[in-house]
Image (spheres, rainbow, N blue to C red):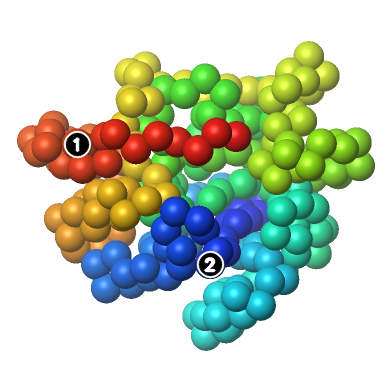
């Protein structure tokens, strides 16, 4: 069984253009995400899935320099981008990660993948009922499920967000939900605005790199509660 983490990334984000290459403690945000995802024990390969838009040529060049495997596909039909990337990688299990989550946690990724395998389900995530901070979002699903959804989903809005067909038809699929004992869903650790970026910068400057756990961040915020207020008022874009 080959488990591939596919990180979707592009430079054309609307609220913070070019955010995936912004600096976090001496390295681009995308580098921080890749480093952290690679530490997940259950992930065999990490690849970048970007778009065929000209503005993402710089991102493709950056991946080539690292070097990281990078595949290009539709900007808006992200479901197709994931399917084509997963097929090219010959993935048996796909882990969906977004490039605007520089605090993504390898232990959480492993737990989501374990949920898929231990429960013998087709889809596992920590996002259906949120208890983790926004920014630790992880989804894992079988390639066979991805292929079925790719063939069946005809809703462009759902295809842009990859897994909406699954979460809107829970009765049809074997789904595992990873939840935490404590509800930290009010915390915002994703990067979509300048305020989010300022928060991520604060965290990375404190640790001086990307080798920290999400529990470490919780502890730091407990001692510095004003840091969580940096991006507290930002509203998440609707799916």
Q: Quadrant of residue 8?
A: bottom right
Task: In this rendered view, identify the residue nearer to me: 192 or 107.
Answer: 192
The circle drawn on residue 140 is none
Is 178 rendered above or below residue 201?
above
**Residue visible at 38% across and 25% down in the picture:** 185
Residue that lies at the very extreme toward the top in this rendered image: 171
**Which of the labelled discs sits on residue 11, or is there none?**
2
Q: Quadrant of residue 155?
A: top right
Considering the numbered disc 2 on the image, is that residue within a helix, a strand or a loop? loop
Q: Is any atom of residue 86 visible in this view?
A: no
Q: Position of residue 66 (x, y in %)?
A: 50, 80
160 sits to left or right of 198: right
In-front residue for pair 103/46: 103
212 relative position to 1: left or right:
left
Q: Residue furthest right?
A: 151
Please provide percent x and percent y for residue 129: 52, 20
**Label 2: how many Cα within 10 Å (few below 14, some 14–19, many 20+):** many
Tag 2 and tag 1, C-beta contact below 8 Å: no
For residue 229, which numbered disc appears in the image? Answer: 1
Relative vertical location of residue 182 with respect to residue 127 in this rendering, above or below? above
Position of 236 relative to 171 (above/below): below
Indicate the secondary structure of the residue bearing disc 1.
helix
For the point 85% across and 43% down, the residue is 150
């Amino acid at each position: 069984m080959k488990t591939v983490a596919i990180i979707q990334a592009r430079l054309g984000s609307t609220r913070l253009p070019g955010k995936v290459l912004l600096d976090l403690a001496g390295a681009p945000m995308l580098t921080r995400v890749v480093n952290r995802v690679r530490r997940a024990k259950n992930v065999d390969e990490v690849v970048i899935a970007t778009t065929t838009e000209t503005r993402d040529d710089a991102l493709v060049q950056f991946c080539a320099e690292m070097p990281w495997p990078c595949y290009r596909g539709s900007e808006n039909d992200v479901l197709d981008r994931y399917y084509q990337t997963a097929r090219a990688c010959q993935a048996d299990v796909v882990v969906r990660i977004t490039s605007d989550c520089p605090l993504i946690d390898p232990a959480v990724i492993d737990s989501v993948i374990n949920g898929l395998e231990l429960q013998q389900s087709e889809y596992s995530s920590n996002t259906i009922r949120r208890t983790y901070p926004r920014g630790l979002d992880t989804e894992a699903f079988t390639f066979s499920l991805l292929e079925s959804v790719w063939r069946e989903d005809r809703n462009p809005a759902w295809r842009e967000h990859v897994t909406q067909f699954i979460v809107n038809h829970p009765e049809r699929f074997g789904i595992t939900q990873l939840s935490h004992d404590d509800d930290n869903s009010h915390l915002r650790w994703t990067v979509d605005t300048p305020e989010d970026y300022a928060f991520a910068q604060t965290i990375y400057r404190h640790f001086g790199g990307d080798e920290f756990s999400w529990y470490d961040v919780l502890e730091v915020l407990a001692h510095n509660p004003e840091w969580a207020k940096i991006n507290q008022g930002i509203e998440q874009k609707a799916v």
